[in-house]
Amino acid sequence: MTDLVAAPRPFVDGQWRSAEAGTLVVRSPSTTEPVAEVEAASPAHIEQAIVAARRAFDAGPWPGLDPAERIAAVLRLANALDARSDVLVETVIAEAGCPRVLTETAQVDMALQSVRHLADLYGRRPTWEHNEVPLADPLVGSR
């Protein structure tokens, strides 16, 4: 069995968690051969992850970052993923059974290009745009 999984245990709220829910064998859909065995996240892990994500979104550092800092963070992530694109390609092929050319171009390269393109668009958006509709007003029609 080839271990293509970098994180074999659930990582929740900044901590590695134990396998409360046992293990899962990940099989290649094209060969049915095992490609990885990972510890499963329990329903409690999932609930903890949801709560942690909400807390991070509302009170973590991200909401306080200015647009340039957010763009820089997103581009650092894109660069880190790009540096590991060979591992990403092999992982997608193993877990999804996708042809290599489709995986390389559409599922990895185009996805990374999209991240960079969206970061660029976000960086070029106006800081203020005139809008006749007050954003606090609901946008539903009256009946």
Image (spheres, rainbow, N blue to C red):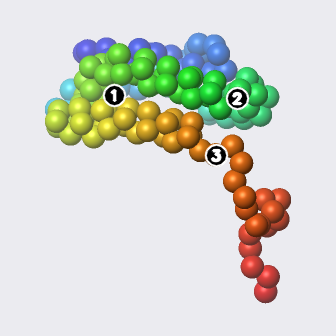
Distance, label 3 to label 2, CA atoms, is 14 Å
The residue pinned by badge 1 equals 26
Q: Nearer the viewer, residue 126 or 67?
A: 126
Name the image quarter holding residue 79. Answer: top left
Judge the density around disc 1: few (<14), some (14-19), many (≥20) Cα neighbours within 10 Å: some
Mark 3 falls on what kind of element? loop
Q: Label 2, on which residue?
A: 66
Residue 74: give x, y in percent of width and height: 53, 27
Is label 1 or label 3 in front? 3
Question: Can residue 37 be seen?
Answer: no
- The answer to whether mark 3 and mark 2 are in CB contact below 8 A is no
Check the image and name the residue furthest to the bottom.
143
Q: Between tags 1 and 2, which lies in front?
A: 2
Cα distance, mark 1 to mark 2?
40 Å
Q: Where is the N terminus found, in terms of image quarters?
A: top left
Callout 2: few (<14), some (14-19), or many (20+) C-alpha neighbours within 10 Å? few
Q: CA distance from mark 1 to mark 3?
A: 45 Å
What type is the residue that disc 1 sits on? Val
Residue 117 is drawn in which quadrant? top left
Callout count: 3
Residue at numbered disc 3? 126
Mark 1 lies on a secondary structure that is strand
Residue 26, horizontal then vertical, whole percent: 33, 28
The answer to whether the residues at label 1 and label 2 have Cβ atoms under 8 Å apart is: no
Local crowd size for mark 3, using a 10 Å CA cut-off: few (<14), some (14–19), many (≥20):
few
Confirm whether residue 19 shows in the render: yes
Of the 4 image quadrants, the one containing the C terminus is bottom right
Marks 1 and 2, the one that precedes in the sequence: 1
